[in-house]
Amino acid sequence: MLSTRETEYIDIGLQYFVMARQAYLCGFMPVGPNLFHHAFEMLFKAKFIELGQAPEDLRKNYGHSLAKLWPDFKTVATGFPVGSAPPLERFDPLMSQVHAWEDVRYPNFPAGTAVVMSGSLRQNHVNETTGEAVKAASKYNN
């Protein structure tokens, strides 16, 4: 059974996800991708709360970093029934890209770099999983 705290994280994560999809479909840049970042962060943290970690510890250990959350989440996301989850490594590039949108919450973002959600994000953004630099995918990333 889910705890109240875990349910709150799931509820907020799903609200962020629904609003992120709507923002993306409306072309709201850069808020849409930032909302996706929040959604994944809350949903991943819900899993850790299910496993007994305190929200305060999650805040201290991970902050808002999907680059820190994602590798640990992959080790505990086993699916239901247990062991039925497919390998999650194929989502590593996506999580690295979504992580790049954490900075949008600060007024100086994009600070001389342009942003686009389809494919690549910020010019010269380094995929933290593969170590490869993202190449410009649109006129906004030149």
Image (tube, rainbow, N blue to C red):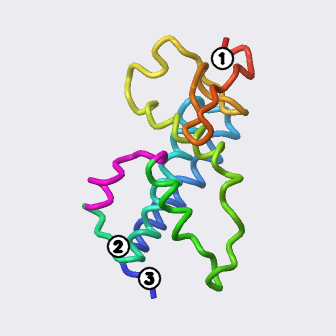
Q: Which residue is mark 2?
A: 5
Q: Nearer the viewer, residue 139 or 28?
A: 139
Q: Which residue is mark 1?
A: 141
Task: Look at label 1 and name its amino acid.
Answer: Asn
Q: Whole-Å distance between the Cαs marked 1 and 2?
A: 40 Å
Question: Which of the numbered marks, if any, corresponds to residue 2?
Answer: 3
- Name which quarter of the figure residue 51 lies in: bottom left
The residue positioned 43% from the left and 31% from the top of the image is: 103
Q: Is residue 19 above or below residue 105?
A: below
Task: Find the magenta span and give its range.
Answer: 57-67
Disc 1 crowd, CA 10 A, few/some/many (<14, 14-19, 20+): some
- Are dots 1 and 2 in contact, CB under 8 Å? no
Q: Quadrant of the C terminus?
A: top right
Which type of secondary structure does the marked residue at label 2 adopt?
helix
Does the magenta-highlighted stretch encompass residue 60? yes
- Are dots 2 and 3 in contact, CB under 8 Å? no
Q: Quadrant of the N terminus?
A: bottom left
Residue 122 percent across, percent down from the top left: 59, 24
Task: Look at label 3 and name its amino acid.
Answer: Leu
Q: Whole-Å distance between the Cαs marked 1 and 3?
A: 43 Å
